[in-house]
Image (tube, rainbow, N blue to C red):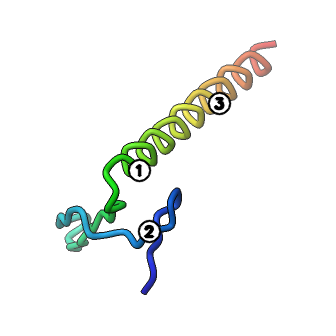
């Protein structure tokens, strides 16, 4: 199975594994990372920036909906 890095295209490697128990079901979560640590840091920054923008837009939309219903 191919699993290329979204930024550089190198084959990603297994970074960490953990087991989570949710509703009496065990689920193994495996995190894959880029073998190039500088690239991985840039990818993590891109993901964090996207999440921040998503949260900001979500908050902004909730506030906008709240103002409309108050009128």
Q: Position of residue 22 (x, y in %)?
A: 25, 64
Q: Position of residue 35 (x, y in %)?
A: 31, 62
Callout 2 secondary element? loop
Mark 3 crowd level (few <14, some 14–19, many ≥20, 10 Å Cα): few
Nearer-the-camera pick, 6 or 65: 6
Instruction: Give me the disc on residue 57.
Output: 3
Quadrant of the image for the N terminus? Answer: bottom left
Q: Are marks 2 and 3 in contact (CB under 8 Å)?
A: no
First in sequence, mark 2 or 3: give its number.
2
Distance Cα–Cα, label 1 vs label 3:
27 Å
- Above/below status of 59 relative to 20: above
Distance Cα–Cα, label 2 vs label 3:
32 Å
Callout 3 secondary element? helix
Q: Within the image, what quadrant is residue 63 found in?
A: top right
Q: Are marks 2 and 1 in contact (CB under 8 Å)?
A: yes
Tell me the residue that label 1 is attached to. Answer: 39
Distance Cα–Cα, label 2 vs label 1:
10 Å
Tell me the residue that label 2 is attached to. Answer: 10
């Amino acid at each position: 199975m191919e699993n290329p890095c979204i930024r550089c295209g190198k084959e990603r490697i297994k970074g960490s594994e953990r087991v989570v128990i949710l509703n009496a079901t065990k689920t193994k979560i495996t995190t894959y990372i880029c073998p190039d640590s500088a690239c991985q840091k840039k990818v993590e920054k891109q993901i964090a920036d996207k999440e921040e923008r998503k949260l900001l837009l979500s908050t902004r939309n909730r506030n906008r909906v709240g103002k409309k219903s108050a009128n």
